Each structure stands twice: as structure tokens, then as C-alpha cells.
């Protein structure tokens, strides 16, 4: 199993960054939360910061870790480790992806994500729901 980190990057408007994979990828034209494989000896948090800088030229602040998702694609088995992050305030510069969008959280369920990212989106929506219900309790 390969450890892969991903970032749920939120901007000041609480929109979430998603990126689209290219034609020659394992999952052509599917959308995903950006990230990548953890290197030997690298922490997951260091990995996500490095990957986002390399792929999107963005500086991020890691805010919270969500529960990892394990997914078997048949040709690869991954443990996707999602981090909720804040964007630095700049727009991404695409290096590996063909497109990006900032979406409202409620739009995530309609995105054509690759399979493991669907699970991450569902976890994030549950996280938001829990946060909102806790705020109402106060």
C-alpha cells in the first residue's frame, strides 16, 4: 500500500480547491484534491506542504488531519491521507494538472472525482456538518 497525501485547500471565502488530471494520467480527466506520495522518511505533513508547492506553487498552512481513506484501484492500493489546509492567498500555478476550480463545499458531491477522492469529499462534508452543528450549540 502506498501512502498518498491530499490537501483540502480552503480560501478566505471557504471555497475548496480541486484540480483536474491530464489525459496521460492513471485517471484521465478526473478531478482530485491535490497532493502526492510520501517520500521515505518524510512526515505526511511535510509531504503535503512539499507536494502543493511543487504542483501548484502555493504555500499552505496545515490546519487539521482527516481520517485516511484506503482504496484499491486494482493496479494500485493507496492510503489517502487528507489534510484541511488554508491557502496563502494566491492563485495556483498549474504544473501537473490541466485545470483548477474553487468550489463551494456543497458542490463537491457533483464533481467527477476519482474514487478515493469521492470518499475524502464525503468525509470533508461530514466534518463541515459536525463543525456547523457544534457552532450552533454555543
Image: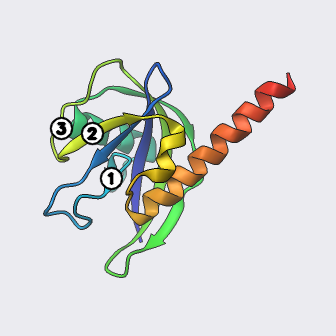
Inspect this view and state whether residue 43 appears: no
Q: Which of marks 2 and 1 is nearer the N terminus?
A: 1
Distance (Cα) linking label 2 and label 1:
9 Å
Q: Position of residue 59 (x, y in %)?
A: 32, 26
Q: In this view, does 87 lie to the left or right of 51?
A: right
Report the front residue among 117 and 37.
117
**Quarter of the picture holding the C terminus:** top right
Which residue matches tag 3? 94
Inspect this view and state whether residue 119 appears: yes
Which residue matches tag 1? 31
Which residue matches tag 2? 100
Residue 116 sits in which quadrant? bottom left
Report the front residue among 78 and 128.
128
Q: Where is residue 70 in the image (x, y as percent from the top left)?
A: 51, 67
- Counting other residues with Cα less than 10 Å from the Cα at mark 2, is it few (<14), some (14-19), or many (20 or more)? many
From the viewer's perspective, is the residue at label 3 or at label 2 nearer?
Answer: 2
Query: Relative to 116, does residue 11 appear above or below in the rendering?
Result: above
Q: Where is residue 113 in the image (x, y as percent from the top left)?
A: 39, 57
Q: In this view, does 28 lie to the left or right of 107?
A: left
Residue 56 sits in which quadrant? top left
Q: Which residue is drawn at 48% across and 34% down?
A: 104
Distance (Cα) linking label 3 and label 1:
14 Å
Q: How is the image coloured?
A: rainbow
**Quarter of the picture holding the N terminus:** bottom left
Question: Is disc 3 placed on a helix, strand or loop?
Answer: loop
- Farthest residue toward the right? 137
Report the front residue among 88 and 107.
107
Q: Earlier in the sequence, mark 3 or mark 2?
A: 3
Q: Which of marks 3 and 1 is nearer the N terminus?
A: 1
Question: Is disc 2 placed on a helix, strand or loop?
Answer: strand
Amino acid at each position: 500500500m502506498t501512502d498518498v497525501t491530499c490537501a483540502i485547500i480552503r480560501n478566505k471565502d471557504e471555497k475548496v480547491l480541486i484540480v483536474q488530471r491530464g489525459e496521460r494520467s492513471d485517471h484521465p480527466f478526473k478531478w482530485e484534491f491535490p497532493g502526492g506520495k510520501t517520500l521515505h522518511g518524510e512526515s505526511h505533513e511535510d509531504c503535503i506542504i512539499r507536494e502543493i508547492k511543487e504542483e501548484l506553487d502555493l504555500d499552505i498552512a496545515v490546519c487539521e488531519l482527516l481520517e485516511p481513506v484506503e482504496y484499491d484501484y486494482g493496479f494500485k492500493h493507496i492510503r489517502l491521507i487528507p489534510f484541511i489546509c488554508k491557502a496563502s492567498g494566491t492563485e495556483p500555478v498549474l504544473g501537473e494538472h490541466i485545470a483548477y476550480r474553487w468550489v463551494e463545499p456543497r458542490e463537491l458531491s457533483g464533481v467527477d472525482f476519482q474514487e478515493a477522492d469521492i470518499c475524502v469529499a464525503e468525509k470533508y462534508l461530514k466534518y463541515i456538518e459536525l463543525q456547523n452543528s457544534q457552532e450552533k450549540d454555543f
